Image (cartoon, grey):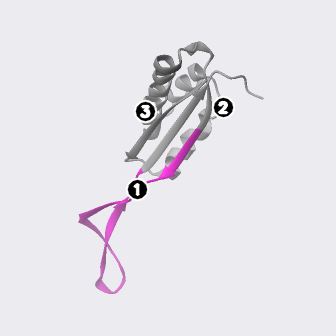
Amino acid sequence: MQAQAISRYLRVTPRKARQVVGLIRKKPVAEALNILAFTKKRAAGELAKILKAAVSNAGQNTRVDIDRLVIKSVQVDGGPMMKNTRRFIPRAMGRASALHHRTSHIKVVVSDEIKN
C-alpha cells in the first residue's frame, strides 16, 4: 500500500527544493530522514516534516510496517509568487520592480512495495 503527504505554499523556491529532493528519491525512509538531518539546506527541514507526515499517514490509514517503507515518488511544483509590495529592486531608467518570492508545492508518496 502507499500513502502520501502534501505541503502547499512553502516559502522555498522550487529550484532549491529539487536539489534536496534529488538526495532522497527512491531511498528507504529511515535512510532519507538521516540524510535530511545532516543536509544544510533550509528545504531539508521542511522536507523532513512532510516525509514524517507521509509515514504517519501510512501507519494510521493502511496499517503497514513502517520499517519497510520506501519513498516511491517526490514531486516539487512551483506555487504562486508572493508579491511583497514594500520591497523593490532598481531597474533601468529610474524605474523599480517589486520583489517576487517563490513558493513550492511538495508531494511525497511512500510505499511498502519492493522496488523493481
The answer to whether 30 appears left or right of 9 in the picture is right
Q: Amino acid at mark 1?
A: Arg
Is 1 left, or right, of 40 in this rendering? right
Alpha carbons under labels 2 and 3: distance apart: 19 Å
Say above or below: 12 vs 67. below
Q: Which residue is mark 1?
A: 102
Instruction: Choose between 16 and 47: the one closer to the eye.
Output: 47
Q: Which residues are magenta?
A: 74-103
Q: Amino acid at mark 3?
A: Gly
Q: Quadrant of the N terminus?
A: top right
Tag 2 secondary structure: loop
Q: Which residue is mark 2?
A: 26
Q: Quadrant of residue 2?
A: top right
Between 53 and 83, which is closer to the camera in this rendering? 53
Q: Gap in Å between the C-alphas at discs 3 and 1?
A: 18 Å
Precedes in sequence: disc 2 or disc 1? 2
Residue 45, disc: 3
Does the magenta run of residues contain 67?
no
Counting from the top left corner in percent of width and height, residue 81 is at 38, 59
Q: Residue at x 45, y 32 (%)?
A: 50
Observer-side mark, 2 or 3, equals 2
- Crowd around label 3: few <14 · some 14–19 · many ≥20 (10 Å): some
